[in-house]
Image (spheres, rainbow, N blue to C red):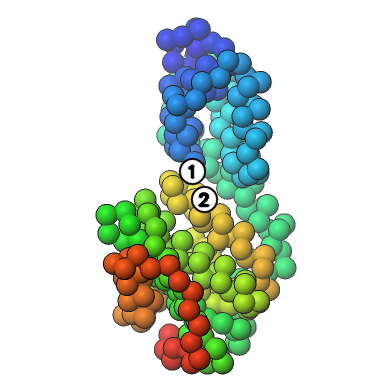
Amino acid sequence: MCALCNTTLESEVHLFWECSFARALWFQSPWSFHTAALQFDNFEQLFTWFGNFDDHNLLFHSMCVMEEIWLSRNDMTFHNSSPDPNASHHRIMRRFSEFYHVKECESISDTQFSEECLSNFDAIFMTDASVVDQWAGLAFVQIGNAAESFHGQDYCQMISVLHAELEAILLALKAASVKKFFKIQILSDNATAIQALKVRELPFAWGSFPVFRQCVEMFKFFSCISFKSVSRADNSVADRLAYLARVNNVCSLLFVREAVPLVTAS
């Protein structure tokens, strides 16, 4: 019998995918896998399915889950230690975060991260999201004294406010890379998103981790990047643009001749 659930004969597919303990761990992953929706005849088929994903983070996280399942199974078999899905999830995320931190340090080691970074940025962006009933308007606006300023808006479905804020920041990062800015600052009134991007860690935000990962992967396009939390009052321009994007279903990238006056960059 399976040592973890004691309801079914143990097999590789059952242990690593179908067992109630395994299902809990897969569902708690950043990708929220619903294992009941997928059936595999053997472990090779399961392993091949994971191998089809061109996502090294997903693959490594999956290995962390399988490692934890195997260790928990052995603890129960040899030490009679009952499995704890929540404790196992924390260990998985800690192990994955260690890998993620090392990977990102290797891939973006030339990028400077600082509260001030350098005194002169190529561009400073305010970002915001407006969310109602899982639909969000996203916006960014370049501010400061640039010769040419621009803003962008988007409208899409979101699962949380944090998810929407990170999507707005990602929108600004993509625009900055297209414009070939190398030294940038991102301002947002979402302190959670800003702090996570500063330390490059967001281990327990289910559903928001994939877009957070995309934001971090954009860092390699910049030689210097700074993130700063501002008050909602100081972020009124981006807030208004996000609201208009939501109520009008707007997706646009607009260029204007004069920049929005800089009021919060100090």
Q: Secondary structure at mark 2?
A: helix
Q: Secondary structure at mark 1?
A: loop
Look at the picture and state if 236 lies above or below 213: below
Q: How many marks?
A: 2
Look at the picture and state if 105 lies above or below 40: below
Q: Position of residue 264 (x, y in %)?
A: 43, 85
Q: Residue at x 50, y 13 (%)?
A: 3
Query: Which quadrant of the figure has residue 246?
Result: bottom left
Q: Residue at x 51, y 64 (%)?
A: 170
Comes first in the chain, label 2 or label 1: 1
Q: Position of residue 57 (x, y in %)?
A: 61, 45
Residue marked by disc 1: 30
Query: Which quadrant of the figure has residue 184?
Result: bottom right
Query: Marks 1 and 2: in contact by CB < 8 Å?
Result: yes
- Residue 210 image label: 2
- Residue 59 image label: none
